Image (cartoon, helix red, strand yellow):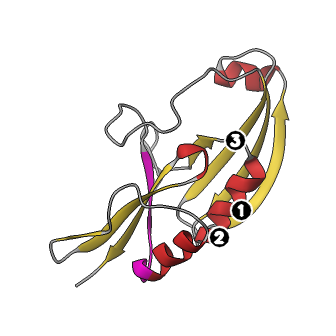
């Protein structure tokens, strides 16, 4: 039975990027699966996002298990407001997106080979997890989590 008036599941997390192709490639290399791309414009988009003259290109990506989706969006219009791309992890607002991985050392090694650096260090949390933050495209903090024990 479907519950009405309540959240059923998370649909997706949306991230605005400058270079949609590069960001898509980055997340696909990390292991997400590309579902497709498309453009959106018109009054309906303007009304949804509360801006005028919106032209936005999106790429939908999905985790291999099919339960998590990421929407990458490149706004061609209107012009974006200046922001802080390298905001630290404790800045209020959406700060990071986390993905479960297998063999975190191998994942981090592959990212380092592509020039990606850790934000801090790869650490172990008790006997439960190994985790770290990396800085992805457009300053996005991506947390990698491996369950251990």
The percent coordinates of residue 68 (x first, y second) are: 53, 60
Residue under the image location 73 percent in, 51 percent down: 59
Front one among 93 and 35: 93
Tell me the number on the disc at residue 7.
none
In the image, residue 98 lies in the stretch drawn in magenta: yes
Residue furthest to the left:
126
Q: Is residue 111 left or right of residue 56?
A: left
- Answer few, some or many: residues within 10 Å of disc 1's Cα (few below 14, many 20 plus, some between 14 and 19): some
Residue 65 visible to an observer of this rendering: no
* Tag 1 near tag 2, CB within 8 Å: yes
- Distance of label 2 from label 3 (alpha carbons): 18 Å
Secondary structure state at the residue bearing disc 2: helix
Q: Dot 3 corresponds to which residue?
A: 73
- Answer few, some or many: residues within 10 Å of disc 3's Cα (few below 14, many 20 plus, some between 14 and 19): many
Secondary structure state at the residue bearing disc 1: helix
Residue 98 visible to an observer of this rendering: yes
Tell me the number on the disc at residue 25.
1
Secondary structure state at the residue bearing disc 3: strand
Front one among 25 and 8: 25
The percent coordinates of residue 4 (x first, y second) are: 46, 41
Q: Earlier in the sequence, mark 1 or mark 3?
A: 1
- Distance of label 1 from label 2 (alpha carbons): 6 Å
């Amino acid at each position: 039975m479907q519950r009405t008036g309540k959240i059923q599941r998370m649909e997706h997390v949306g991230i605005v990027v400058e270079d949609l192709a590069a960001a898509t490639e980055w997340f696909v290399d990390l292991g997400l699966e590309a579902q497709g791309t498309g453009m959106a414009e018109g009054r309906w988009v303007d009304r949804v996002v509360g801006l005028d003259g919106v032209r936005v290109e999106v790429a939908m990506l999905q985790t291999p298990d099919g339960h998590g989706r990421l929407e990458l969006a490149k706004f061609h219009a209107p012009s974006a407001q200046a922001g802080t791309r390298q905001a630290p992890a404790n800045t209020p607002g959406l700060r990071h997106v986390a993905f479960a991985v297998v063999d975190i050392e191998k994942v981090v090694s592959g990212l380092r080979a592509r020039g990606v650096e850790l934000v801090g260090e790869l650490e172990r949390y008790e006997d439960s997890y190994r985790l770290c933050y990396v800085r992805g495209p457009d300053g996005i903090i991506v947390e990698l989590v491996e369950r251990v024990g």
